[in-house]
Image (cartoon, rainbow, N blue to C red):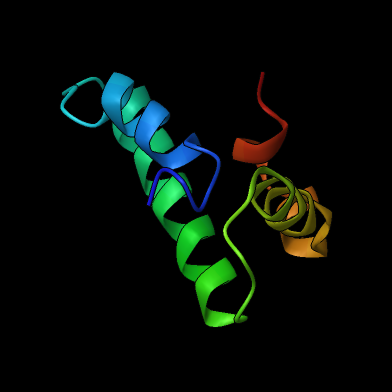
Amino acid sequence: MAQQDGGIFDEVSGRHGQSQQPESKQLMAVLNALRDVISAEGLTLSPTSYFAAAMSALEKPETKSSAQASTP
């Protein structure tokens, strides 16, 4: 899938996929969720589609009011 999505998934997965750190597990969960949403919408996996899916999720009212989303 690296060719199809610009290598984003493989690159991040290679760095964080085997890590037991909570931050790495959270990053992988978000990346997998983004990939699932993009695929379910029938869109091409690309750097742009990952970015658009992430921005769309952050723009939702329930996300904007979330303490987790606003914590640096």
Image x and y of residue 46, in percent? 63, 51
Residue drawn at (36%, 40%), measured in percent from left and top? 28
Front residue of 25/31: it is 31
Left or right, 22 with respect to 7, comes to left
Q: Quadrant of residue 62?
A: bottom right
Image x and y of residue 29, in percent? 37, 47
- Seen in the picture, residue 8 relative to 37 is either above or below; the reply is above
Residue drawn at (42%, 41%), measured in percent from left and top? 9
Image x and y of residue 71, in percent? 66, 25
Farthest front residue in view: 3
Quarter holding the C terminus? top right
- Seen in the picture, residue 62 relative to 24 is either above or below; the reply is below
Front residue of 13/1: it is 1
Asked whether residue 22 is in view, the answer is: no
- Seen in the picture, residue 67 relative to 35 is either above or below; the reply is above
Residue drawn at (57%, 58%), measured in percent from left and top? 45
Left or right, 37 with respect to 10, comes to right
Front residue of 19/3: it is 3
Residue drawn at (48%, 59%), measured in percent from left and top? 35
Image x and y of residue 55, in percent? 78, 49
Asked whether residue 41 is in view, the answer is: yes
Q: Quadrant of residue 12?
A: top left
Front residue of 63/26: it is 26
Tally of numbered discs:
0
Left or right, 19 with respect to 7, comes to left
